[in-house]
């Protein structure tokens, strides 16, 4: 299911902004309540002081002059002399009790209305000034309503600005999309990193993917080219032998041509098997696991014992209880292929006794053949190279396969001629 990244970002921002706005409104209400209370209580205090100043004259006047403050519908006043006698009341039905000697605020509820009362007492008597709490709530409600209306009015503009800002922020992604759409299928050029830092990980991952795809395509092209090049000569030779077998009348010549044809088929099959093995190794992702060397040696012996017997070679492998190996974890399938190729080469091109030895730092495969000329020790590691005068069938890929698997496991391959004759292949841990 597809979804809009822009819409998701905007919804996410709204989910964050809305609670923050509600918290801001709550803080505003708390602050407003504090300020309004402080304002009204200061007003009550001033009014009470003014009223207290008129106490000496209240008993002498029928209609005393009272201070005028605000709307009298929401407030009430009362005054008493020192003896507690009521001198003045303007309470609109509110019953205010005298509290001689008390100065301060008190809360009162009458007739389903909440009132805030301020008492001021002195030698001349006492006064009380009361105000309805509903007036304060109305003022606070008006402030919050104004804030809410302002938010609702600004919300569409804020959403438009947010939509534009998110689109501008996502512009680098659109630019990357255009670059990918315009590039050729075989273009392995890395994407530029001139993008916001938040996109660096994406660019790096895409460049890594582009590089791996390019390497895969390169391996496939190389495999196709190698296969075409190396199969051209064997196939031509097999065709010639097939034509000879078809045309000659002499049974001996026909038999010889058929034998050479079968030999060519075997060489081509071996070459294809090695090419496929090399292709798999180059594309392989290692499956590391704890290695069961006794089981691996058993399978290795079963794989090469037939070839050793056909070449009259004595095969010597470490005993089943041997525990000294340079690797304890690795890809079992690839390691079996690597050791089988080394033993296969030693059996085919060596002779006498072929041995596999190992300790904690290296694995050695030795034979008792003629060895390789010193000048060719590096050359024989190249793909498809076979020493001059080589009579054994082969593809020239075995050591390439060995080197690749060794590198995947942190090992290095080295070749040495033995003093007593023969060749030794050593797999040792890479330095550094």
Image (tube, rainbow, N blue to C red):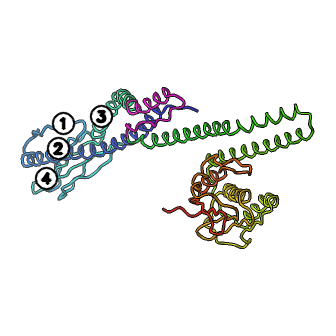
Q: Which one is earlier in the sequence, the residue at label 2 or at label 4?
A: 2
Image coordinates of residue 431 in percent, x first then y, are 50, 63
Seen in the picture, residue 415 relative to 136 is either above or below; the reply is: below
Q: Is residue 381 magenta?
A: no
Q: Which residue does the image show at 72% across and 44% down from the upper left?
A: 271
Quadrant (top left/top right/bottom left/bottom right) for the N terminus = top right
Residue count near mark 2 (Cα–Cα under 10 Å), binned few <14, some 14–19, many ≥20: some
Nearest the viewer among 283 and 46 is 283
Instruction: Give yes or no for contact between labels 2 and 1 (Cβ–Cβ under 8 Å).
Output: yes
3D distance between C-alphas at marks 3 and 2: 20 Å
Nearest the viewer among 264 and 370 is 370
Image coordinates of residue 230 in percent, x first then y, are 68, 40
Taking the image as shown, residue 246 lies to the left or right of residue 14, namely right
Q: Nearer the viewer, mark 3 or mark 1?
A: 3
Image coordinates of residue 382 in percent, x first then y, are 60, 49
At numbered mark 3, what does the secondary structure look like: helix, strand or loop? Answer: helix
Nearest the viewer among 21 and 17 is 17
Which residues lie in the magenta part?
A: 167-196
Residue under circle 4?
81
3D distance between C-alphas at marks 2 and 1: 9 Å
Q: Which mark is residue 142?
A: 3
Image coordinates of residue 18 in percent, x first then y, are 40, 38
Residue under circle 1?
70
Q: Which one is earlier in the sequence, the residue at label 4 or at label 1?
A: 1
Seen in the picture, residue 413 relative to 219 is either above or below; the reply is: below
3D distance between C-alphas at marks 4 and 3: 40 Å
Q: Which residue does the image show at 57% across and 55% down from the upper left?
A: 375
Residue under circle 2?
43
């Amino acid at each position: 299911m597809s979804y809009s990244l822009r819409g998701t970002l905007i919804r996410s921002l709204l989910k964050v902004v809305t609670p923050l706005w509600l918290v801001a409104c709550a803080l505003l209400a708390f602050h407003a309540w504090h300020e309004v209370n402080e304002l009204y209580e200061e007003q009550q205090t001033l009014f009470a002081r003014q009223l207290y100043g008129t106490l000496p004259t209240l008993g002498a006047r029928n209609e005393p002059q009272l201070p005028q403050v605000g709307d009298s519908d929401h407030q009430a006043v009362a005054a008493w002399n020192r003896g507690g006698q009521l001198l003045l009341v303007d309470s609109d039905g509110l019953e205010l009790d005298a509290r001689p000697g008390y100065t301060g605020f008190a809360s009162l509820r009458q007739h389903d209305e909440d009132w805030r009362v301020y008492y001021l007492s002195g030698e001349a008597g006492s006064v009380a000034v009361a105000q309805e709490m509903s007036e304060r709530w109305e003022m606070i409600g008006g402030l919050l309503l104004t804030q809410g209306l302002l938010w609702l009015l600004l919300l569409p503009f804020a959403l438009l600005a947010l939509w534009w800002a998110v689109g501008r922020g996502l512009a680098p992604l659109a630019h990357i999309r255009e670059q990918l759409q315009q590039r050729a299928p075989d273009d392995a050029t890395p994407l530029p990193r001139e993008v916001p830092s938040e996109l660096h990980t994406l660019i790096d991952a895409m460049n890594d993917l582009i590089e791996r795809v390019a390497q895969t395509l390169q391996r496939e092209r190389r495999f196709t080219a190698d296969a075409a090049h190396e199969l051209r000569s064997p196939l031509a030779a097999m065709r010639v032998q097939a034509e000879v077998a078809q045309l000659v009348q002499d049974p001996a010549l026909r038999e010889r041509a058929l034998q050479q044809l079968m030999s060519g088929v075997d060489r081509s099959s071996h070459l294809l098997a090695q090419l496929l093995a090399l292709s798999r190794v180059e594309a392989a992702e290692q499956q590391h696991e704890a290695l069961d060397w006794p089981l691996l040696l058993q399978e290795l012996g079963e794989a090469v014992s037939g070839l050793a017997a056909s070449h009259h070679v004595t095969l010597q492998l470490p005993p089943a209880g041997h525990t000294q190996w340079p690797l304890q974890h690795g890809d079992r399938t690839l390691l079996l292929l690597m050791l089988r190729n080394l033993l296969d080469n030693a059996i085919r091109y060596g002779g006498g006794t072929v041995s596999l030895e190992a300790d904690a730092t290296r694995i050695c495969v030795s034979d008792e053949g003629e060895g390789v000329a010193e000048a060719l020790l590096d050359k024989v590691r190249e793909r498809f190279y076979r020493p001059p005068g080589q009579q054994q069938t082969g593809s020239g890929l075995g050591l390439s396969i060995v080197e690749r698997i060794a590198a995947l496991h942190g090992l290095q391959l080295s070749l040495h001629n033995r003093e007593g004759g023969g060749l030794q292949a050593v797999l040792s841990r890479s330095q550094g």
